Amino acid sequence: MMMMQVETEGEATCTAVLTPPLSLEGGLAAELRPANLVQRVLSLFRNVRPGSDLSHFQLPATFNLPKSQLQLYGETVYCAGEDLLSRCARGKDGLDRLTSVVAWSISTTRPPIFGFAPYNPVLGETHHVSAGPFNVLLEQVSHRPPVSALHATDNNGNVELVWCQHPVPKFYGTSIEATVKGKRQVKLLKFNETYEVDCPNLLIRLLPAPSVEWSGNVRVVCKDTGLEAELSYCRSRSFLGIGGDPRCVKGRILDSGSGDVVCEINGHWDRTVSLKDVKTGKVSVLYDATRAVANLSTPVVENRKGVSPSESAVVWGEVNDAILKKDWEKARQAKRRVEDTARKLAKERNERGELWMPKHFALSQDKNGSWECWPLESSVPPAPIVVPS
């Protein structure tokens, strides 16, 4: 855990509390997990109707990870054991670059933890972190529905990320499935290539055996090269339908025009994923999870005066501190203060007839409910919070 007092102009001193990122080991959740977790989770949904949208379901602090959803999104970009994004920009040809983007997209699939969820970000909350050459900025651009925008650029001008995500969790009686809507764009500027990347769904099974896993289909498409990848996050086959490994990923890379399969993809997203060249039969390692997302460093505050009062680690700092100390009454009260303040500000805006506008993004919504975001600046500046090298 990292704590830092942050002095903001005209405001009282507040505390930024940064916690370790999720990695293959799970870390924080194992420390916070109570003995009767499964029974407590089931009791939460006793009075929830099947088919209900859980986007605004309020979890008690005892079920929260000490971090915001904005931070979890950001960690998939700036917390990594190897620089997969720079590798994308170094690809020698279109196929090499596509496979690198696929490897990066798999690296954003971090092990979910049953019974714990991050905080729902408040409107206008931001998260700004630098790691090596990459500067990453996120903003909560809508609260109802919850929409998060991300912009990341590197100091060399080679890679730019822009995405706008909108999770829609629904309760189905014995399970919860969160569909993540919105496209993630990886732009390789030197090659004038844009890759559109989907996100898998998060499936939480309550009965008969509690579990949480990533599922569904993901596409990585580059119209500029005419290549695309199709991935399926699935459970491996098991004897008589019992057991099976939920962390399998299978897929293929194909030519969009002809439909010809160029490569086959097979493996486990929390271990290794292999790539087989269909023409030559050569098999290589596409992705190694141990190198990518194990033993990750916790971000630290490098410039305390530069930390915004809207920064996630500040907004939720008191709640984080209480959860880490397992002071659940203090955590409950601190969380309520954050949420009550957000509701009060929204009410005051409505009474004045003011329309809230994001600070860092422009956004729009089409008639089908899909959201798009555009960063207002061409690049992201270095952040006051950094990931130690």
Image (cartoon, helix red, strand yellow):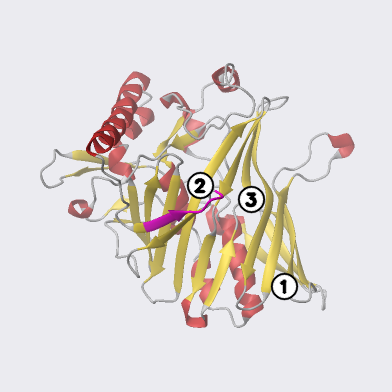
Query: For the magenta stretch, what is the residue range?
Result: 362-368
Residue 234 - label: none
On screen, residue 192 above or below 211: below
Res. 229 visible in picture: yes
How far is mark 3 from mark 2, CA to CA?
24 Å
Which callout, 1 or 2, points at the residue further toward the start of the chain?
A: 2
Identify the secondary structure beneath mark 1: loop
The amino acid type of the residue labelled 2 equals His
Instruction: Using a 10 Å C-alpha cutoff, classify the residue at mark 3 as few (fewer than 14 neighbours), some (14 to 19) or many (20 or more).
Output: many
Q: Which residue ends up furthest to the right in the rendered image?
A: 240
Q: Which mark is residue 270?
A: 3
Q: Nearer the viewer, residue 45 or 68?
A: 45
- Which-is-in-front pick, marks 1 and 3? 1
Residue for badge 2: 166
| Residue at x 62%, y 60% (from the top left corner) | 288
Query: Residue 220: x, y in percent?
Result: 63, 64
Residue at 53%, 66% (x, y): give it.
84
Query: Residue 369: x and y, percent?
Result: 53, 48
